Image (tube, rainbow, N blue to C red):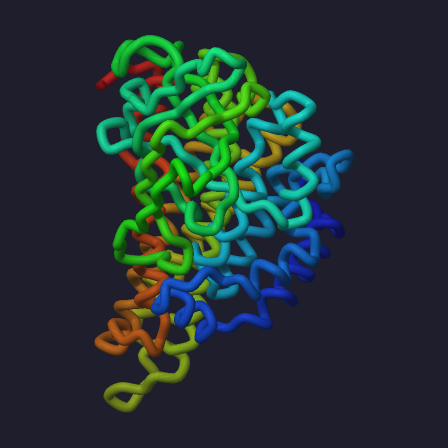
Amino acid sequence: MNFESNPDHEAIVDAVDRVCAQFDDTYWSERDTNHEFPWQFYKQMADGGWIGIAIPEQYGGGGQGITEGALVLNRVAASGAGMNGSTALHLTMFGLNPVVKFGNEQLKETFLPRAAAGDLHVAFGVTEPDAGTDTSRIATRAVEDGMGGWIITGRKIWTSKALESEVVLLLVRTDGEPGEGFGGLTLFLADLNPDHVDIAPIPKVGRNAVASCEVAYDELPVEGWRMVGERGRGFQHILHGLNPERILLAGMACGIGEAALRRAVSYAKERSVFGRLIGANQAISHPLARAHMDLHAAFTMMLKAAWRYDNGLECGEEANTAKYLAAEASFFAADQAMQTHGGLGYATEYHVERYWREARLQKLAPVSQEMTCNFIAQNVLGLPRSY
C-alpha cells in the first residue's frame, strides 16, 4: 500500500469539494427538516459523472474502485451533507454491485448505463420485521408463475430511497422455510410497481431527506431474467457486497465526524467565557484533539480496506474494523461538537445536532457495533460463535 500523494485521488477530492461547496448547511438542514430528497444536489453529482464512478466503463461508468467511491462519499459527508447527501448517492453508486458481479448481460445492459448516468434510482430490500440481523429468517417469498417468471409477496422494512426509486434489489425466499438457513434465498432486481407495491416512510430521528420505508409486496410479477445470479445463492451474492458497503459507510462516517469537528474547532476559537477563548481550556481542546486523531486512524483503516478490496485481497477484517472505528470516531466527534457548543449545540442553527443524529446511526447500520465485534471475535480471533 502506497501512502504517497495520488494526483488522481486529489483531483477527485478537489472536484467533489467544488460541487459540494454549492450546497451549504442551510440547504441540507432544510432538506432534512422538510423531508425533501436533494434533487438539485443529486443532479449536479450525476452530471459530473460521480454517481457512476464505480460502474464498469463498458456500461458508461467511470470504472473506478471502492477507494475512489469512498473518497467521493467521504467528501460529500464532510461538506455538511452528512448521510442525507451520501446516502442519496451510494445506493445507486454501489448498490448495483451484485448486478455487476453476478448479473446476466441483459440485466447489465438494461440497467447499468442508466445507473451510471444517474437516471436510475435503486433501493435495497433485505431487512424484514422478523428478520433483521438474522437474514436466514427472511419470509418474503417468490414463487414461479409457470411462464418463466416469478410472483413476490411479503414485507420489507428500512428500505431507503424506496420513494424515489424505480427498482429494488430484493432478497427473497424461493426455497425452504424461514430459519432453515441461507440456501433458499434468491436475489432479484424488481420494479417497484405501484400496482403491487405499497411504500410507507418510517418516521425516524434523522437523515430525513432520504426516507427509510416499510414496503409491502402484493403478488409483484418479476420476469425471469431479472434474477441476479443463481437461484438459492442470493445470500452469497449479497455477502460479496458487504465488505465494500462497510468501507463506503466508513468513509461517510469519517466525513460526518470531520464536519462536526470543523464546526466545534471554529466555535472554540471564537467563543469567549470568563475572559478567555474556550479553546484554551484543555477540557475543550483535548477531546477535540482526540477526535481528530480518532478520525484520522479510522480513515487510514478505511483506505487500507479499500486498497485490499480493489487489489483482490481478502479484506473482511479490515473492512469491519474500518466500519467499527469510523462509527466510534464519528459519534465521538459529533458528541464533542455538541458539548463544545454547550446549550447552543442543541439548537438547529449551529447544525451540530444534525451531525450528532446522523453519527449515532453509524453505530447501528448497516450492522451494529456488537455484530462487528462478533465477526472479529469469531473470524479473526477464532473464538467460539456467540449467537
Question: In the picture provided, is 80 more to the left or to the right than 201?
Answer: right
Residue at horizontal 46%, vertical 41%?
A: 123
Quarter of the image with the C terminus is top left
User: Is 294 above or below relative to 268?
Assistant: above
Residue at horizontal 76%, vertical 37%?
A: 57
Residue 341 pos. (x, y %): 29, 74
Residue 276 pos. (x, y %): 31, 86
Q: Can residue 122 be seen in this view?
A: yes
Residue 316 or 215: which is nearer the viewer? 215
Looking at the image, how many numbered discs can be counted on the residues? Answer: 0
**Picture quarter containing residue 23?**
bottom right
Residue at horizontal 42%, vertical 43%?
A: 194
Residue 200 pos. (x, y %): 31, 48
Residue 222 or 15: which is nearer the viewer? 222
User: Is 220 above or below relative to 347?
Assistant: above
Question: In the picture provided, is 62 more to the left or to the right than 148?
Answer: right
User: Residue pushed farthest bottom?
Assistant: 275
User: Is 190 above or below relative to 230?
Assistant: below
Q: Can residue 384 be seen in this view?
A: no
Residue 270 pos. (x, y %): 39, 84
Quarter of the image with the N terminus is top right
Question: In the picture provided, is 118 more to the left or to the right than 210?
Answer: right
User: Is 276 above or below relative to 330?
Assistant: below
